[in-house]
Amino acid sequence: MIRRALAALFWRVTGYRLQAEPYPEPPAVIVAAPHTSNWDFAFFLAILWSLRMRVRFLAKHTLFRGFAGSVLRALGGVPVDRRDPAGLVDDLIRRFQAGERFYLVITPEGTRSAAKGWKSGFYRIARETGLPVVTGYVDKVTRTAGVGPTIELTGDVRADMDKFRAFFGPKKGLRPEFTSVPHLAAEDEPEG
């Protein structure tokens, strides 16, 4: 109740509107983009609290020190040691396969700065577990934030990423100059 009240206050103060297309029950992966500002975190908390979504989200391990770490864990944070991201992905896959039911929020850009493309962890997790991918966004242009269409991955990386580009292409983050194009390195590999 308190979280929803805080989220409602956030929407009034920011002047942004919450939008939500139908989305599946957990478990699912939520791709949160564009990720261009520290304020993105507040927007995504407001989205999740408004919609009463039980989530886990990934954040760099250095943020989990001291009191801040306790708060982040209570909010659903999972520390990521960027020196061993594969171990974390394997752990999350095991948790989903064991039947844990939550939404996993991932910012595939992996940074708040402009990136050449997205990191592929969300894709690997969704493919290996068969989970749907829900699009989550903040768009400065339309002053909206929320969850958009759900994308079922096919394994055709380029075709799947075309769907993400179609949805996220017109969206601009809070700092538009840092908005990255949805692209995975696997799209550049020769077919065969």
Image (tube, grey):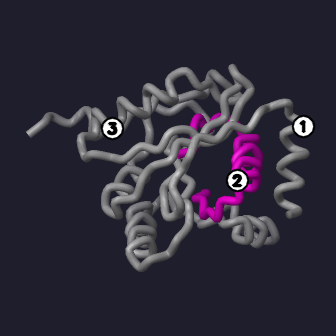
Q: Which of the numbered marks, if any, corresponds to residue 160?
A: 3
Q: First in sequence: mark 3 or mark 2? A: 2
What residue is drawn where x is 74% and y is 43%?
Answer: 43
Measured from the top left, where is residue 122 in percent x and y?
43, 52
- Residue 153 part of the magenta segment: no
* Quadrant in which the C terminus is drawn: top left
Q: At label 1, which amino acid type do we have?
A: Arg
Residue furthest bottom as drawn: 98
Q: Is residue 102 left or right of residue 36?
A: left
At x 43%, y 34%, the residue is: 164
Where on the picture, by quarter, is residue 65?
bottom right
Give the residue displayed 33% in from the left and 38% down from the top. 160
Please determine whether, in this image, residue 123 is positioned above or below residue 98: above
Q: Position of residue 143 (x, y in %)?
A: 74, 26
Give the CA separation, mark 3 to mark 1.
35 Å
Q: Which mark is residue 59?
A: none
Q: Are marks 3 and 1 in contact (CB under 8 Å)?
A: no
Mark 2 or mark 1: name the one nearer the start of the chain. 1
**Is label 1 in a helix, a strand or a loop?**
helix
As drawn, 76 above or below 184? below
Please tell me which residue is depicted at 13% across the width and 36% down the height of the picture: 191
Residue corresponding to mark 1: 12
Between 52 and 55, the one lying in front of the other is 52
What range of the chain is rendered magenta?
31-60
Identify the secondary structure beneath mark 2: loop
Dot 2 alpha-carbon crowd within 10 angstroms: few under 14, some 14 to 19, many 20 or more: some
Count of numbered tags: 3
For mark 2, what is the residue? 51
Left or right: where does residue 82 sit relative to residue 77? left
Picture layout, residue 177 above or below residue 28: above
